[in-house]
Amino acid sequence: DDGDVVEADRAVRWADSRELGVKVAAGSEMRFDTTDGGFEPSAGAVINVTAVNTEAPGFITVYPCDDPRPTTSMLNTGPGLVVSNAAIAAPNDEQQLCVFSLTTTDLVVDMMGSIDDAFRPLVPVRVLDTRA
């Protein structure tokens, strides 16, 4: 073993809006190709999303691009918080995932891995919400 690691064997940073100097605008989505970084087309992508410097309470959701946006969040955030969460999401037929932010924030999005055909993704559904 010569210590070389194939790119797909490592997590891939898809985006860090702090490096661009421009926050993700409220109500906007970012589009990602799940094959970037050497990953093979897959039934699911394992990603980690971090919200930083959020300007107002809000949420982030991840879903197959061009599908209706789900009514559930994968990450809830607010001012002064740095919040991160991992998710498994199904890309669309073109292997694209969208990340939507309700509020203006910096986003960091990392592709952690992919799942082959054995994974059967579900559309997220809220089964319980104890808030009034």
Image (tube, rainbow, N blue to C red):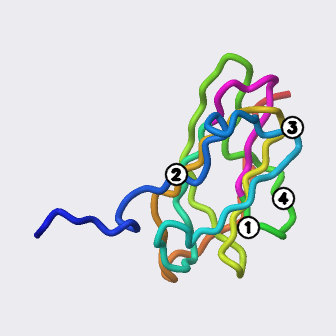
Frontmost residue, 129 versus 2: 2
Name which residue lies at 72% across and 65% down: 123
- Pointer 3: residues within 10 angstroms few (<14), some, or many (20+)? some
Secondary-structure class at tag 3: loop
The residue that mark 4 highlights is 69
Residue 97, given in percent of the width and then of the height, sits at: 69, 64
User: In the image, which is nearer the foreground, mark 1 or mark 2?
Assistant: 2
86 to 119, vertically: above or below: above
- For badge 3, the amino acid type reads Ala
Per the rendered image, the range of residues in magenta is 51-62
Name which residue lies at 73% across and 19% down: 79
Frontmost residue, 85 versus 3: 3
- The disc, 3 or 2, on the residue closer to the chain's N-terminal end is 2
Q: Quadrant of the N terminus?
A: bottom left
**Are the two marked residues, 3 and 1, in contact with CB atoms closer than 8 angstroms?**
no
Q: CA distance from mark 4 to mark 3?
A: 15 Å
| For residue 91, side relative to residue 25 (left or right) | left
- The disc, 1 or 4, on the residue closer to the chain's N-terminal end is 1
Location of residue 68 by image quarter: bottom right
- The disc, 1 or 2, on the residue closer to the chain's N-terminal end is 2
**Image label count:** 4
- For badge 4, the amino acid type reads Arg
The residue that mark 2 highlights is 13
Q: CA distance from mark 1 to mark 4?
A: 8 Å
Q: CA distance from mark 4 to mark 2?
A: 23 Å
The residue that mark 3 highlights is 26
Q: CA distance from mark 3 to mark 2?
A: 22 Å
User: In the image, which is nearer the foreground, mark 3 or mark 1?
Assistant: 3
